[in-house]
Image (cartoon, coloured by chain):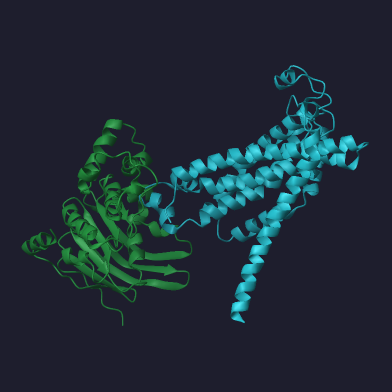
Chain colours: A cyan, B green
Amino acid sequence: MNRFIQYSITFFAWISGIILIGAIGVLLIFLLFKGVSSLNSFLIFGETRPLDALLFRKDVLDGLFPAIIGTILLITASIVWAIPIGVASGIYLAEYCNLRWKPFFSFMLDLLAGIPSILVGLFGFTLSIFLHRHLSEHIYPCFLISSMALACLVLPYIIRTTEQALVNLPFSVKTTGLALGASRLQNILFILIPYNLSRIISGIILAIGRCAEDTAVIMLTGVVAMAGIPHSLLAKYEALPFYIFYISSDYNSQEELMKGFGACIILLAVCAVFFTLANILKRKAEIRFATRT
Amino acid sequence: MPPVHRRAAAVKESKIRIDGFKFYYKKRMVLKEINGELEERAITTIIGPSGVGKTTLLMVLNRLYESIPDCRVKGRVEMKLNGRYVDIHKLPITVLRKRVGMVFQVPNPLPMSIYKNVAFPLKLSNVKDKIIIEERVKEALKDAFLWDEVKDRLNDSALELSGGQQQRLCIARAMIMRPEVLLLDEPTSSLDMEAALKITRLLVDLKKKCTLVVVSHYADLTRRISDHVLTLKDGYLHTNSKMMAAPEENNMTDDIE
């Protein structure tokens, strides 16, 4: 009986892994199969010459280029907002937070992580209306509001990974610097963060994925179908996930739908580039601060 | 029944005085009443069964216990600085920890080069002059009997050193601030016999420069080179002074060689 259970668990674990990898494989093959035929320079640059578009000399009106740039800028901006706030909050929770307050903050953080993205979008939308009325007439839903709302959405990932990485450090590592006369801040800057850099980057990778795919937030906070490349933080912009959503719900011909699949492949490629960059950084951090087991 | 407060008669001049010190972890009283004096420029070894709070007592002396959440303390610990006894709880923490170095049970070099490891405390103190740093690193590595072994590869990673060398590196790192007291938490217990012997010899030499407080196992070598042995048991510190005459001590180191 005991042996039977043992074998079943092993079997179940294997099957789960195979199904998961199989599903991802099927999805990728399906996407490539459908979308590869529409992947060409026309899909990205439309009538504009690629070189002109890449050098921002001419606007691309009927291609995905503005959406690709929009997505890249959006991911970058959201991550730039989220990293300092997230890492600092994680450090606060792990190192400074009063034990009495910690459960409260943890609960709020879980709540933030559990908020549906459409609500975060709605919050961004309301915020932009509020700012429009009370601060400046020029503020509408825009790139800045979108990126900040997305940053709110991904903050919990970064805060949690940073906090967990710091909390789970062995006592001996945490006190190495302190015992040598480091102040608390020095200990965080010279020991705790370097030791945890690779784990913090893991959290950032999760956040990048989330920023790249989220449609609900940006739909309410400033993305539009035709805006071109955003020229300021207060401008409207285009983004790939929105294009995919809009094409798939509102296509007029089979050809247009195929363009949607092409856009999916491009979005995957954009993510892949970000993940690769993050992973290279992570590998470097690991080599430099390899902790012994 | 708690033992009466006994001061070790053999202590000539005390570097550290502990008076009625109590340590609570959560609701448990780990150290019930610690009284004692630690002699200046001598090796004092604290022994006792595991889990009795030896490391905790050591961490009291550089206030590292303050990193442990949920603990409380009572009582006084004084250290002699420039001829006066000062309550260590009134000193700025970074100042105290630069005067009281600590070496842990398991060597804990930072994942950087040998040179940077030893120079790390200077970086913390904002020492920028490269010539001074270089001199101090050399001095500290010599203090720790490590200079000859590593002088040609200072830029190699400290993690490539053997266990014994890593421990001596940690001692060098602690010595670079020229501390007045060096705390060692079972410094030889994770090492093989030969490496442990080297550390033991090193401790006898370091005694000239600073006061050593060693937490040790019963059967440990360090016990044999100690000037005083204190036993921590049931939350009390018992004095069972075992002064060693100087010639005997020399024989001891000869044995080791």
Q: Foreground: B246 or A43?
A: A43
Looking at the image, residue B83 sits to the left or right of residue A101; the answer is left
Image quarter (top left, top right, bottom left or bottom right) of the N terminus of chain B = bottom left
The image position of residue B95, as x and y in percent, is 34, 47
Looking at the image, residue B142 sits to the left or right of residue A79; the answer is left
Q: Foreground: A154 or A138?
A: A154
Q: Which residue is situated farthest in the left direction here?
A: B247
Looking at the image, residue B195 sits to the left or right of residue A43; the answer is left
Tally of marks: 0
A255 shown above or below B254: above
Q: Residue at position x 32%, y 48% from top?
A: B98
Looking at the image, residue A189 sits to the left or right of residue A200; the answer is left
A37 shown above or below B10: above
The image position of residue B19, as x and y in percent, is 30, 66
Residue A93, can we see it?
A: no
A245 shown above or below B213: above
Q: Residue at position x 77%, y 52% from top?
A: A116
Q: Quadrant of residue B114?
A: top left
Q: Foreground: A249 or A134?
A: A249
The image position of residue B182, as x and y in percent, is 26, 54
Residue B188, can we see it?
A: yes
